[in-house]
Amino acid sequence: MPFGQKAPIGLDIGTASIKVSQLRERKGGYDLEVFDILPLPPELIVDGAIIDSLRVIDAIREIIRKAKIKTKDTVLSVSGHSAVIVKLITLPEMTEEELEESIRFEAEQYIPFDINDVSIDFQIIGPKEEPGQMEVLLVAVKSDILNDYIAVVREAGLNPVVVDVDFFALENIFEVNYEIEPGRIVGLVDIGASSIKMNILKGGTPAFTRDTPTGTNILVEALQREFELSYEVAERLLRGEAVEGVMEESAEQIVMETSEELITEISRSIDYFRTSMTGEDVSELILAGGGALVKGLADRIRDRIGVEVSLIDPFRNITISRKLDDAHIRDMAPLAAVSLGLALRRVGDR
Ligand SMILES: Nc1ncnc2c1ncn2[C@@H]1O[C@H](COP(=O)(O)OP(=O)(O)OP(=O)(O)O)[C@@H](O)[C@H]1O
Ligand SMILES: [Mg+2]
């Protein structure tokens, strides 16, 4: 990047909150110059689809103002099982150029949508054991949803330069901060409000991805029902704030019971992975997303699934600028992870 030019911002438009990050590259790492988060009311984005564009545009404008961002170039992402399909497929060996030509044809059978309604990208992972075959990571995004995201970012006065998917943003921030051990199997788990995104890496390359349409919203809804609360108040309760008339222990009990469902989904993904990989085991789960911060959840995942579990630490190779509230941002690290991964991307990346 030319000297003096600011890196693009990473804008993670989630269903429950928008996060924004900006990094400055320096020798041996990065400095975090900007981070902010803004909660969204639950009805604006449902299951990855933007329902109320005007209010999403307002929210983006607000977070940009709040974070005092001057940069226009923006890397954004799309996610949600109804918008994004990520699949590892096996194809006959060919060059990148050849695959570029034939990918739409090859992809058709793997995509549950009309091939004419999706934008397709791919990454050649490498040769398979069987000679003449190679493994390809196929990414298909529904074009109408993709265009909606690009449109709101534009309408908010920003300039979209790269569109990523949450899976890869998380993988990128992981790579920048963690040592990749050959053969070691690590599961990145983003527990969001309306989805759990799992990306299982073997020696640093994706071996399995799964997007489950359930997330911390089921915890908020359970709290709402049990204590007759509004979404906003129940959400505050989940984040550990005191709410009048609700005992902390009773709230924790409800969260604990309901989160079994989330743990079951994570466990199921690991089972699918194991079956598809002839018995190989995940040795570690690294959690991201707001769900990673739910009190006691990481411990219960560890106990039930029986693997090492930790919260993602994106600040091993990223220094937090002195302008920012270091302790506060560290506390929110799992929430920041996807936006940080987006902020790593550069104009011209595909
Ligand atoms: N400190 C906290 N403690 C407990 N829960 C938290 C905390 N912070 C956030 N959460 C919960 O995490 C949820 C999801 O956060 P996150 O920002 O990752 O979702 P999202 O990215 O908007 O959703 P999705 O990725 O599914 O679109 C919030 O709705 C909130 O309930
Ligand atoms: Mg998210």
Image (cartoon, helix red, strand yellow):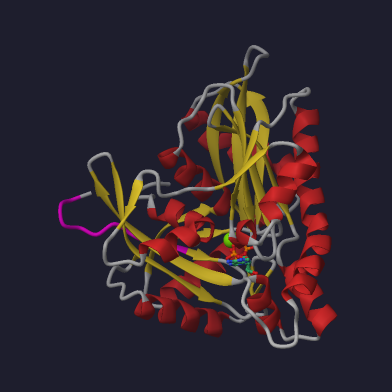
Image side of residue 199 versus residue 204, left or right: right
Q: Main secondary structure of the magenta part?
A: loop
Q: Identify the residue shown where x is 53% and y is 56%.
A: 334
Query: Is-magenta flag for residue 239?
Result: no
Image side of residue 188 versus residue 152, left or right: right
Image quadrant where residue 114 sits: bottom right
Image side of residue 20 versus residue 283, left or right: left
Measured as percent of width and height from the top left, residue 336 is found at: 48, 59
Measured as percent of width and height from the top left, residue 63 is found at: 42, 77
| Near-viewer residue (44 or 215) | 215
Image quadrant where residue 42 sits: bottom right
- Residue 138 to residue 181: above or below: below
- Residue 160 to residue 188: above or below: below
Q: Which residues are magenta?
A: 2-11
| Near-viewer residue (229 or 3) | 229
- Residue 274 to residue 215: above or below: above
Image side of residue 206 versus residue 81, left or right: left
Extreme-left residue of the structure: 3
* Number of marks drawn: 0
